[in-house]
Amino acid sequence: MAGGAIVDTAGGKQYPGKLTLYVVFTCVVASTGGLIFGYDIGISGGVTSMDPFLLKFFPEVYRQKQAASKSNQYCQYDNQLLQAFTSSLYLAALVASFFASAVTRILGRKWSMLAGGFTFLVGAALNGAAQNVAMLIVGRMLLGVGIGFANQSVPVYLSEMAPAHLRGMLNIGFQLMITIGILAAELINYGTNKIKGGHGWRVSLALAAVPAVIITVGALFLPDTPNSLMERGHPEASRRMLRRIRGTDDIGEEYADLVAAREISKQVQHPWRNILMRKYRAQLTMAVLIPFFQQVSGINVINFYAPVLFETLGFKGDASLLSSVMTGGVLVLGSMVSMFTVDRLGRRKLFLQGGAQMLVSQIAVGTLIAVRFGTSGVGEMPRGYAAAVVLFICVYVAGFVWSWGALGWLVPSEIFPLEIRSAGQSITVSVNMLFTFVIAQAFLTMLCHLKFGLFYFFAGWVVIMTAFVALFLPETKNVPMEEMVHVWKGHWFWSRFIGDADDVHTGVNVLALT
């Protein structure tokens, strides 16, 4: 059994080596893949609240918005075509993630990032020059393809390059870049909304080219990970890269584990079929439920539609955009908190604390809205109430970003063995995109019909997902990726799916190798 050590999930098996400047550089560059995802999340909600944009592409919504000042505030943005502008991207990303899985496995992680950045760049150009809704939607779908490729490869790349004891911090660099992208987009929306002539929305959409160029050019300079090189049959290149990123010649133990993982991977001809095997039940469950729960937490209600939501609650014009900038700032600060605590406190504590904080905040927001608008949607929100709503939304956003926001990408990227890692990450991305699409397409209609009860709806899901973590997610901090099977083997529930014939190091049937 390669490696030979029993993993203590509280402390974890440790390989020799240190955090090198080379690893820091590569992880920072790769993390910029999160900028394109974050920028798009932040930009779409801003432009859909701009009157010139609505007049040109969605005049019916503009008329509803003007009429809503004296009628039902909940329904002023209820329009399926407007929601399709936001959601079409995520449907494209869902489909793209399956193709990205093959690219990531066969060609390596960096080429998937490069493809994602270039496709996003083309989509940004098309959106900035859009003359009709069809051009907008096609551009959005190209942006989605780019995001599907980037989200497939970046989290896995970061987890594979990072030392085990710092994997959480370096992987959350992806989430930090997402939040920086969101904040940058919201600041740009605030500025472009003041441009005279009504063309500010074009500037907002076209500037998506900037993060696209950053990741596209950056990907050209990124090396492949040792895991990817080994998976693709380049053992010596893998050894050299491992020596370089660990900053030591004492890589024998970690390299032996990579070789063992590669031998198992060679036995697997159909990873999509193998991931359905009983012994991978725990990983498959997490790949589906973690991204599902991340979306039904309600966060993308804030991310996509923050300016729209704030206008619905009585904030007007620049005030709604400025309020969304505040939430964007909280996202960035919360990501930094997560980066510096995840490898000390562990994943479970952040999940549980964040869940409790989100629950209290959502109930508070729903209640404040109910008191002022009731079920009729008619009313006004005094300044004090408005400040309280923004405060609780910020508390909610902070709780999300240092728990489900960061860990929703980290945990799935670190739990899969090499032989099914690309397929597993593809499932994570596709489930995430599917339910992002559903929420984006349905939210404004749900707000119209469920009214303040929508916040209670999402609070109910927070209760379910927090209970799931408490019962079924073991701690994974400090555990090397190729030793992760020990975590499942020692869990009260998932251990029943790993038979005695499965090697506790690799999770593969040792009889099949003899």
Image (cartoon, rainbow, N blue to C red):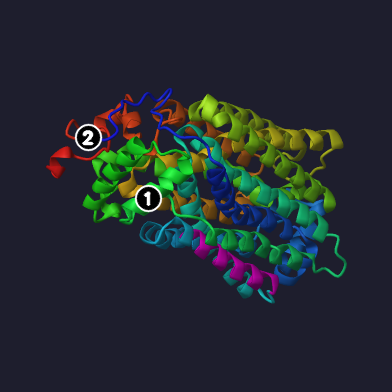
Please give the count of numbered marks on the rendered protein.
Answer: 2
> What's the mark number on residue 503?
2
Q: Earlier in the sequence, mark 2 or mark 1?
A: 1
Q: In this picture, is 351 found above or below 262?
A: above
**Magenta residue check for 448:** no
Where disc 1 sits, the SS reads helix
Would residue 226 be found to the left or right of residue 372 on screen? left
Q: Nearer the viewer, mark 2 or mark 1?
A: 1
Amino acid on which the number 1 mark rests in the picture: Ser
Up/down of 380 relative to 346, above or below: below
Q: Dot 1 corresponds to which residue?
A: 238
Quadrant housing the N terminus: top left
**Residue 90 makes an appearance in the image:** no
Name the element at disc 2: loop
Query: Mark 2 and mark 1: span between their CA atoms?
Result: 24 Å
Q: Taken as a whole, is the magenta stretch helix, strand or loop?
A: helix
Res 509 quadrant in image: top left
Q: Amino acid at mark 2?
A: Asp
Quarter in which the C terminus is drawn = top left
Out of 129 and 121, give the one closest to the viewer: 121
Looking at the rendering, the stretch of residues picked out in magenta corresponds to 112-129
Q: Residues within 10 Å of mark 2 (few under 14, many from 20)?
A: some
Asked if the magenta segment contains residue 118, the reply would be yes
* In front of the other: 254 or 83: 254
Name which residue lies at 23% across and 40% down: 508
The one nearer the camera, 199 or 413, is: 413
Is 261 drawn above or below residue 196 in the view shown? above
Left or right relative to 376: residue 283: left
